[in-house]
Amino acid sequence: MTSEHPHAGTSRWRRLLRFRGPWTLGPPVVVLLCGSLFVVSAQNSDGTDLRPGRYTDLADLVRAESDRYQRLQDRVSDLTDDVTALTESVNDRSVNRYRRQIARFEDPAGLVERSGEGLTITLTDSPEELVEQATETGARLSDYVVHQQDIQAVVNALWAGGAEAVTVMGKRIVSTTGIKCIGNSVFLQGRPYSPPYVISAVGDQDDLLSSVADDTNLQTYRQQADDPEIAIGWELEVEDDVTAPAYDGLLDLSYAEPME
């Protein structure tokens, strides 16, 4: 039987603490420091973001981009006027020949204002009370809002009916126009628009009416418009005087190129 000094155990613990001292004390200190930083951050932020971005929400981003697009569009318009003035001041046979060729394509390209008889169709979301009822009953909410494909279907039906010019929210639609749905807004030529969406066309009224009535892509929408439980907005007006302003957006094209 061996005897052990009464302080031998204590000595071993002291040696162990001296050996592991930094590793033993480090984690608690780090935890305490992190906790202190969290408390200070919470007090300073007062419930707000300590690192706010440039835009606080999507609405601000949309407005900022819309304003930026408008400034760029105004700049393009001014530069276009300058180019036109300089071109007209050049007395050159080749330049004049190209100007005549360009002038022939301006009308079919949508760069000339058109007016005459036509139609106006207005699309809008279902009434709020019906949307609230649909939320409570678990109905499909997508049936209660206007989508980009609904606007595109109306535009296509008007083109099919022989429309000479089409506008959406007063903006001329041309072959390169893209209609995009982002959130609760529809983007057209870089600018956001909210319902109601007003779509107008210049052309023979009978042909336009017949095309809209026979379009299969609009049948579901019009059925939902007649359904009192959905009542999504659909209004069609026959007008004697519709004006489609000239297209005033950017004319350059963006396209992909294959990699070599």
Image (cartoon, rainbow, N blue to C red):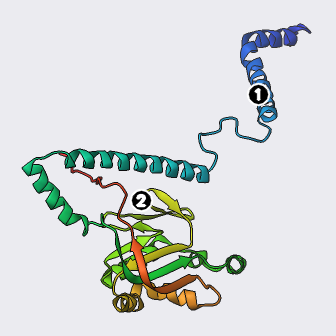
Cα–Cα span, label 2 and label 1: 47 Å
225 is higher (above) or lower (below) than 258: below
At 65% from the left and 88% from the top, the residue drawn is: 229
Q: Secondary structure at mark 2?
A: loop
Q: Secondary structure at mark 1?
A: helix
Mark 1 = which residue? 37
Q: Is residue 153 visible?
A: no
Residue density around tag 1, few if under 14, some if 14–19, many if 20 or more, within 10 Å: few
Q: Which residue is nearer to you in this view: 202 or 51? A: 202
Question: Residue 212 appears at what percent x and percent y?
Answer: 40, 87
Give left or right: position of 154 versus 93: right
- The spot of residue 95 in percent (x, y) is 12, 50
Residue type at numbered disc 1: Leu
Q: Earlier in the sequence, mark 2 or mark 1?
A: 1
Q: Position of residue 180 (x, y in %)?
A: 45, 64
Q: Residue furthest left?
A: 93
Q: Quadrant of the C terminus?
A: top left
Front in this rendered view, residue 194 or 33: 194
The tag on residue 189 is 2
**Whether residue 141 is situated above or below residue 218 in the rendered picture:** above
Amino acid at pointer 2: Gln
Q: How many marks?
A: 2
